[in-house]
Image (cartoon, rainbow, N blue to C red):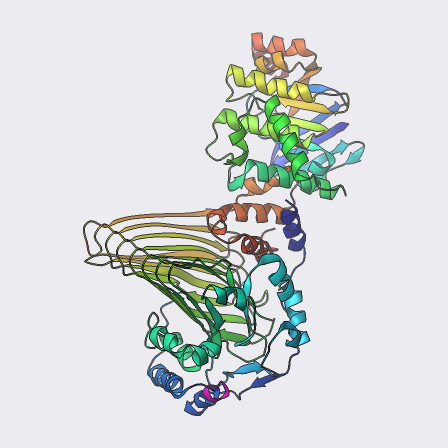
Amino acid sequence: MLEIVNLHASVDGQPILKGINLRIGAGEVHAIMGPNGSGKSTLSNVIAGREDYEITEGDIRFHGESILELAPEERAHLGVFLSFQYPVEIPGVTVSNFIKTAINESKKARGEEPLDASSMLKKMREKMDLLEMDKGFLSRSLNEGFSGGEKKRNEIFQMAMLEPTLAILDETDSGLDIDALRIVANGVNALRSPQNAFMVITHYQRLLDHIVPDYVHVLFKGKIVKSGDKSLALDLEERGYDWIKKEQE
Amino acid sequence: MSEQDQILNEVTSSEYKYGFYTDVESDKVPPGLNEDVIRMISAKKNEPEWMTEWRLDAFKIWQGMAEPEWANVHYKKPDFQAISYYSAPKKKQINGLDEVDPELLKTFEKLGISLDEQKRLTGVAMDVVVDSVSVATTFKKTLAEKGIIFCSMSEAIQEYPELIKKYLGTVVPKTDNFYAALNSAVFTDGSFCYIPKGVRCPMELSTYFRINESGTGQFERTLVVADESSYVSYLEGCTAPQRDENQLHAAVVELVAMDDAEIKYSTVQNWFPGDAEGKGGVFNFVTKRGICERGAKISWTQVETGSAVTWKYPSCILKGDNSVGEFYSVAVTNNYQQADTGTKMIHLGKNTKSTIVSKGISAGHSHNSYRGLVRMGPRAINARNFSQCDSLLMGDRCGAHTFPYIEVKHPSARMEHEATTSKIGEDQIFYCQQRGLDMEAAIALIVNGYCKDVLNQLPMEFAVEAQKLLAISLEGSVG
């Protein structure tokens, strides 16, 4: 589904990603771990198409086609979703209005009919139940005055509504207490299917107790330096990153 | 949702959407201004002698006045002798829609305000002013049953001279300012509305202005009188065809709210703003003011997206005790547009309250100023004001300015003023794009959210039009 080939990217001339190779197949969950500043958020932003990054080498292919030339919204229309590490506030725009607009813009781009109001509402209710969210949530201004946990839950709610084929979760677990973590993980697990894939960026093993990955990759200084199965995450939890840093030096 | 879609669809079309002009034969006086021209206008309208004298008096006052220069706008002053002060579509005397010039009806259709549709679907009574003369008035009968008068100003001068004599010029006197004096001398038409004691007007009253003829100024005069304990909601929409030269629009609106009456006055102003290089466009120099007697309330709501230069301060004189004034405004400037707009809240009575919510949006090379005065007089015990003035900047070549004036003469007065300046963040746009919205849709969404407090004050059908206008006027402003 997603194929990243020798990807190099820089910000303001400063190289951040220095040759990433990664293949994610349908139905798979990949965890990306690594110390601060290793390029994890850059990788997720580059896949989503943020303009501040310059791709100096390599390619990103989605379903076999390069997406480097596509605008962020076009990538979204193909089914790429990014759960932001720091979701922005948009005052005056309600959660429900935002989601409606997002869903129908994507449908329009795919040449589909917009979702009618009652189906929309039904779907919203369903997904809110799944994520144990309060009904009043829909009429609040997007992320305005939300607690850290509410913001993250709102990201997962949007993901559940948009039903992406590839979801990138950028440190979705940071700022969540144990209960919220469980709820969010349950939400993600409910969406797992043989047709879609997840890329989960995290610092901690604890999220991976709930969302069990098929593969774990360690990103260090802009490269994937180690890959393995879920036991790699446990190793990292126990030993930290120092041994990996040493291996690299 | 489907509305949202339509709005977004329309965002993709560019240029000034209402820039066609209607080929209607019109009766136009030669350019220039002197006593003879004023007498001619008055004569063409079969006005009584007192009205002619009133105009001539205003003209004398105007001649002794200078054009104001304190506003934060820069433009080439109009040549008042090069303007034609009267342009009326020929073939007047209309008894029904079928007698209205078909060309004109087509114009309304293009604007999406076919009178027929308006009548049937929305229940909005419209007094349509094209180049200063009211062409058709609808729903008169329904209104008449309640004793409500809603007609053109010309008709009111003929039919209700006592009311006009009593109220015209009482809120905005001829001596008020340069443009008000000019308007008093040469106004060609406008709307008059009277709501009797205790009557709640059952529908939104609406006037649609449109400048059609080239080289004409539009000087309408609107007077709304709400008698004791009555209520009326009044809507005003404006468009103008696209022309190279600047057109002048200098209107006067006067509102009288007697004891316990309420007037809600909403404007969506979409005059041609000039092209992307700043050529052409309407000069919009308007005086709007209302007076509140005891317990009365006046609420101004405006969405200003058009005009090359806007100079406009809808104001409330809170004369009676316990009266309330409100001002909700969205002013958008793009390209080379300039707006200097705001309000005055003059607190004279006890326990008077006012609220000001102003949202400025500047894009392109434009300049957008909020200018507001809150004055609390020596007898305004316990007067209260809340002001919120927000500015949103798009790009780095535009300017936003805030000029709040505060005068307080009684120690019990309470005032709050909040002001913010923000930019549409790349973070916000990227967030929306990641969810599938393109750049234009993202901006439309963010801007509409920003203006929500004001848009919520508009009647439903106007709110939708206003949202579209916001999106259209900000096309191509980022990216």
**Can you tell which quarter of the image residue B176 is in?**
bottom left
Of residue B109 and residue A163, the one placed in the foreground of this image is: B109
A86 relative position to B115: left or right:
left
The residue at 66%/66% (across/down) is B109
State the image coordinates of residue A65 (x, y, percent, origin top left): 79, 35
The quadrant of the rendering that contains the C terminus of chain A is top right
Of residue B286 and residue B391, the one placed in the foreground of this image is: B286
Would you place residue A67 above or below residue B82 in this image?
A: above
**Can you tell which quarter of the image residue B317 is in?**
bottom left
State the image coordinates of residue A33 (x, y, percent, origin top left): 61, 19
Q: Main secondary structure of the magenta part?
A: helix
**Can you tell which quarter of the image residue A48 is in?**
top right
The residue at 51%/34% (across/down) is A143
Residue A228 visible (yes or no): yes
State the image coordinates of residue B422 (x, y, percent, origin top left): 46, 47
- Whether B139 is among the magenta residues is no
Of residue B75 and residue B140, the one placed in the foreground of this image is: B140
Q: Over which residues does the magenta segment extend? A: B42-46
The quadrant of the rendering that contains the N terminus of chain A is top right
- Whether B43 is among the magenta residues is yes
Would you place residue B250 above or below residue B399 in this image?
A: below
